[in-house]
Image (cartoon, rainbow, N blue to C red):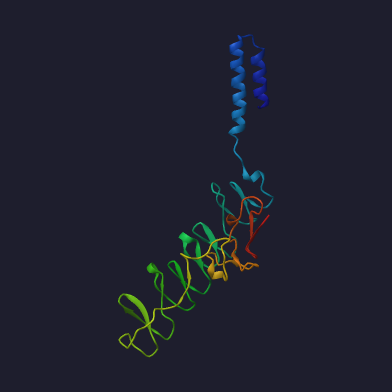
Amino acid sequence: MTERGFDDLARAMATPRSRRAALKALGASVAAGVGAVVLKPFRADAACPSGTTPCGPRCCSAGVACLDASSGKCGCATGYTACGNGCCKGTCTDPVNSCCCETGTTPCGSACCAKGIACYDASQSICGCPARTTPCVQNNVLVCAPAGQSCDGPGPFSTPNTRVKNCVACARFMQPCSVNTDCCSNVCTPNKAGGACGCASDSDCPSSGAPYCDRQTGLCHS
């Protein structure tokens, strides 16, 4: 209860009135005091360490912007790309899965093609044929004719094996991985168990205990 509320209550109790009126005044004053406490919102910035960025229920690392205070979504650090609801290393190719293609590879819908390979059909995430082969379409399927052969030559021809990442099936934070491209974020952190996808932004980390992402190691820390 505020000092003003206490004074109002004292004056009300000092004024001659019936027992019922006095109790009513007391109840109203106490309710007003309780309401003032309940309605006071929690502010994350009151608990954020100096230099960090307040972001609703959490704090973002120093230099990282808050994108959505209502959900505690932190922005991306230098070297990372905003992609859908997350961050990742490289070029964002699939915002739905927050999936990036590594630098040098070719974004192709929800896939990434090997370096030097063009995207044949982004709507179906189909990567093109490798160098020194001829792209052909047989029964509405892309195939690659060996060097020196035309599409009318003897087959059968194989489909291109040039996709290096499938964003629909890529692993997310803390899921097992062996190499960076296993992870949607392109951040695979080695450990004794074989590796797990590391954090790419503070939003990947728990809001308490270890709320900040170390981009060098892909680990959350306090």
Location of residue 75 in the rendering, given as x and y in whole percent from the top left corner: 57, 56
**Where is 74 relative to 39, above or below?**
below
Quarter containing the C terminus = bottom right
On the image, the x and y values in percent for residue 105 come to 50, 74
Would you identify the image quadrant in which residue 216 lies? Answer: bottom right
Q: Residue 158: horizontal and vertical position, in percent?
A: 39, 81
Q: Residue at x 59, y 38 (%)?
A: 41
User: Toward which corner of the image does residue 204 lie, by quadrant?
Assistant: bottom right
Residue at the front extreme of this rendering: 193
Q: Residue furthest bottom?
A: 148
- Up the image or down, 60 lies above or below 19; here it is below
Up/down of 158 relative to 181, above or below: below
Position of residue 10 measured from the top left corner of the image (x, y, whole percent): 67, 17
Q: The N terminus lies in which quarter of the figure?
A: top right
Q: Quadrant of residue 153?
A: bottom left
Note whether 140 is above or below 198 in the view shown.
below
Please name the residue shown 67% across and 22% down the image: 6
Viewer-closest of 71 and 152: 152
Which residue is drawn at the image coordinates 59% and 25% (left, top)? Answer: 32
Q: How many numbered discs, if any?
A: 0
- Taking the spot 51% from the left edge, 56% from the top edge, the residue there is 85
